[in-house]
Image: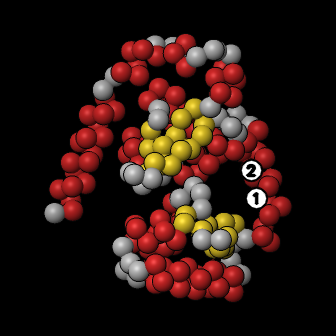
Amino acid sequence: MDIKSKIESLLFISAKPMSIKQLTELIKKDKKEIEKAGLELVEEYKNNKKGIQIIKNSAKLQMVSSPENAKLIREFIKDETTGELSRPSLETLTIIAYRGPVSKIDLDRIRGVNCSLILRNLMIRGLIKAKNDSKKQETYYTITFDFIRFLGINDVRELPDYEKLSKDDTFDRMLNNEQSKDEQADK
């Protein structure tokens, strides 16, 4: 698989901009090759007149919607962020509330689907926040004070059955099982 394809895939699943350094470490190619491929992608997407663009800001790249569709996107986001939470959003938020901090990879494994858009919407609403762990090269999600205040509680431990559910090892067993499957598939 070529470098540009790998960059596209990483930018597509990332909920935030990715640095050239981060892409270099993940793709395991020379920084100059990553920078060159990134700039080529920016130009290719700019010239293709499609609904997705790749932009570069400083030493970071991000996949975004086309500026021509800004009004449509604003309307969609307004509906997504002011209406009721969808069932998948509630499930994701519940996992984060009871098990956080939790990585995106673990959330995807627990739910069985890519949670990028759900995480973005929950962050836009101010219900969760992301923190990057540079050692593990992963982003971890936790609930915010706004989430706690929105529920009218003073502490996350006031959630129903918090003590019991936060210590339940069902997710841990499931994640370990999924990780074992992934490792066997790589062999």
The three-letter code of the residue at mark 2 reads Ile
- Residue carrying label 1: 73
Instruction: Give the farthest residue toward the right.
Output: 71
Residue 166 picture location, percent across and down: 41, 22
Please, what secondary structure does the residue beneath circle 2 have?
helix
Answer whether residue 100 is visible to the viewer in this image.
Answer: yes
Which residue, given by chain and number where applicable, does mark 2 sit on? 77
Direction from residue 28 to residue 80 in the image, left or right: right
Residue 134 is situated, as x and y percent measured from the top left of the image, at 45, 53
| Residue 103 rendering spot, x and y as whole percentages | 44, 44
Q: Hey, what amino acid is under mark 1?
A: Ile
Quadrant that contains the N terminus: bottom left
Specify few, some or many for label 2: CA neighbours under 10 Å numbering under 14, 14-19, or 20 or more: some
Q: Which mark is residue 131?
A: none
Q: Nearer the viewer, residue 59 or 80?
A: 59
* Residue shown at 63% from the left, 80% from the top: 42
Q: Residue at x 30, y 26 (%)?
A: 169
Q: Secondary structure beneath disc 1?
A: helix
Above or below, 61 against 95 in this view is below
The residue at the point 60 percent across, 40 percent down is 129
Give the vertical position of 121 relative to 23 (above or below).
above
Is any atom of residue 48 visible in this view?
Answer: no
131 in relation to 173, above or below: below
Count of all numbered marks drawn on residues in the image: 2
Q: Residue at x 53, y 80 (%)?
A: 35
Image location of residue 55, percent across then percent down? 66, 73
Q: Quadrant of the C terminus?
A: bottom left
Rounded to the nearest angstrom, the CA distance separating label 2 from label 1 is 6 Å
